Image (cartoon, rainbow, N blue to C red):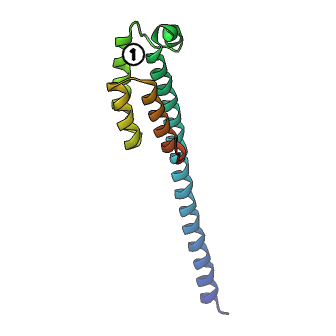
Amino acid sequence: MNATTILSILGTLGLGGLISSYLTILWQRRNENKAKHQEYKESRYKCIILLMHAYMNFEQNKDMLIKHGYEIQSKKDLAELLRTEHINSFLFASDDFIKTFQIFIETPTEENIRKVALAIRKDLWGLKTHL
């Protein structure tokens, strides 16, 4: 082997290593972004479920809302917060969640909370259900 062949082999291995490292970094960043997005969705969805539950049982849950930092004095205030959460959900939520959440806002019932919860479950973990 002459010096040119050795340099070519070393250059190729070095270039391959660089490409491999670059692709690994891209893959890790993508996975980190997905994990952050998933964590954000989980925290927002938990909050929304609690707010819907509080709306259905406002007098029993009013103190809990205040304890968690919400300045809510009436059921009307809570309804406004739910509408705000609905608008914010366009940034991260699935279409199914957005639609079922809108239905809950228009007609707040226990059945509609269950439908929203099922949409959340499907969005977060892709679980299919027959419920």
Query: Of residues 115 and 93, which is closer to you in this image?
Result: 115
Q: Tell whether 114 sits left or right of 95.
A: right
**Residue that numbered label 1 is attached to:** 78
Count of marks placed on residues: 1
The amino acid type found where label 1 is placed reads Leu
Disc 1 is placed on an element classified as: helix
Question: Residue 25's quadrant in the figure?
Answer: bottom right
Crowdedness of circle 1 by 10 Å Cα count: few (<14), some, many (20+)? many
Residue 86: percent from left, percent from top: 36, 30
Name the residue rendered at 51%, 47% in the picture. Answer: 34
For the point 44% across and 34% down, the residue is 116
Q: Is residue 102 visible?
A: yes
State the image quarter where residue 21 is shown: bottom right
The residue depicted at 41 percent of the width and 43 percent of the height is 94
Specify the farthest residue to the bottom.
1
Task: Answer left or right for 54 relative to 91.
Answer: right
Q: Position of residue 93 (x, y in %)?
A: 41, 39
The answer to whether residue 4 is above or below residue 91 is below
Q: Residue at x 34, y 25 (%)?
A: 107
The quadrant of the image that shows the N terminus is: bottom right
Q: Position of residue 37 (x, y in %)?
A: 49, 42
Q: Nearer the viewer, residue 15 or 24?
A: 24
User: Farthest residue in the right direction?
Assistant: 1
- Let me know if residue 90 appears in the view: no
Residue 68 to residue 25: above or below: above
